[in-house]
Amino acid sequence: MKIAIINYGAGNIQSIKFALQRHGYEGVLTSDADEIRAADRVIFPGVGEASSAMRKLKATGLDKIIPELTQPVLGICLGMQLMCKHSEEGDTTGLGIFDVDVKKFTGNVKVPQIGWNHIYNLKSSLFEGIREQEYIYLVHSFFAPACEEAIATTEYGVEYASALKKDNFYGVQFHPEKSSNAGEQILENFLALQPPKEEWNLNTQY
Amino acid sequence: MLTKRIIPCLDIKNGRTVKGVNFLELRDAGDPVELAKIYSDSGADELVFLDITATEQKRKTLADLVLRVAAAVNIPFTVGGGISSVEDVDVLLQNGADKVSINSSAVKNPQLINDLVAKFGSQCITVAIDAKEVNGEWIVHLVGGKVPTNLNLFDWAKEVEERGAGEILFTSMNHDGTKSGFANEALAKLSSERSIPIIASGGAGTIQHFCDTFIEGKSDAALAASVFHFKEIEIKDLKMEMRAQDIEVRL
């Protein structure tokens, strides 16, 4: 299986490569459009600030390529946020894959949220074998509010979407590569997803 | 609910653990990677590696270690000790560290906090503060508590947050090594004044000390070294007791 990890100079991507290696998979760090399109799975990571990350995506043309991918794509942390319509961080226009606007945590909570919290209302085969209320590791100041596309929920002053799904696109706010065994199970599940490719080909014939 | 974090701290010199450890299951008692794996398997929420190497090879040895830890461990870890530039941090994050902590270099050059936050984001920049209570005032110290500054702990913590740090690791020099409990009064003040997470350090001796720092000290996380290294406290037992006292914990 060819796994592309999109490399656009945004933070710690080594850990994702290592998490895959621990499960016998080799991920390729790449910013090459053809290599990304040809991969069986695409992981879109990212930590850091939204507007500067978006600028880097635009500089390499990746902002056009990512929304058109047809294989399973997994956005992690900032990667997930950039797949949304807009982010309050740096007033950034996102890739618009998920129909939700990213907001900053407010109210009586410490920001950033750093540490282990629960995921619940799990709604996708991405969470096969994961129990409701499982612990996952998060580090973030901005969040995607609860919405139609949420496939996992977390509570931090507010109930928000800690994972999103639309068609072949998945996004998780937490770091599966840092979420101990549960996180590695979620990565495994992502790799095991069956892309409904044939169905799409059929549709395009008509 | 977000859980309170338990963080074992490993002191590193020339790529090896410094303080003695009492783990019969370790094949190589000085190998930080093996120890890190044991801690992550036993329920630690996070790890801190504090490098005290003072040689020319420091950077490379530390970067190599970080890479090996990242390859082996599936929980987050922070690296600190002598980090003083954007380039230092870049190398460590590229090699797989999740966060870095800076201490003296931030006091000497506070702008470094802003520079690091601008380049890497708040979420991976922890500022460590060593402070000592002298005549009723908490004074920030450098060089492991040996050299006093003219900074007040609470003023410096405010500045650190304003400059964008994601987290503060506060070590009380009055409590460090005493095993008599954390500096909960100062921690509670720090935690209520600041809106970024506070990690308590210095003074852990018993399981109750950890519970006290979460309840009375309002700490978001607690760090300790020897009580874990010498197995005076098992992380599992600690977490069971935290849960019994209604403290949110990952079990």
Image: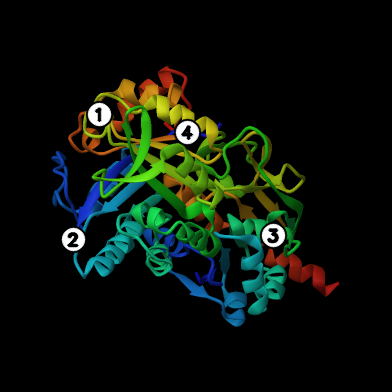
Indicate the amino acid at tag 3.
Gly
Q: Comparing marks 3 and 1, which lies closer to the viewer?
A: 3
**Count of picture labels:** 4
* Whether residue A133 can be seen here: yes
Q: Comparing marks 4 and 3, which lies closer to the viewer?
A: 4
* Residue occupying the point 39% across, 26% down: B184
Left or right of A72 on screen, residue B211: left
* Residue occupying the point 62% across, 63% down: A72
Q: Which residue is mark 3?
A: A90
Q: Which residue is mark 2?
A: B14
Q: Comparing marks 1 and 4, which lies closer to the viewer?
A: 4
Q: Which residue is mark 4?
A: B190
Left or right of A85 on screen, residue B27: left
Q: Which mark is residue B233?
A: 1
Q: Chain of mark 1?
A: B
Q: Which mark is residue B45?
A: none
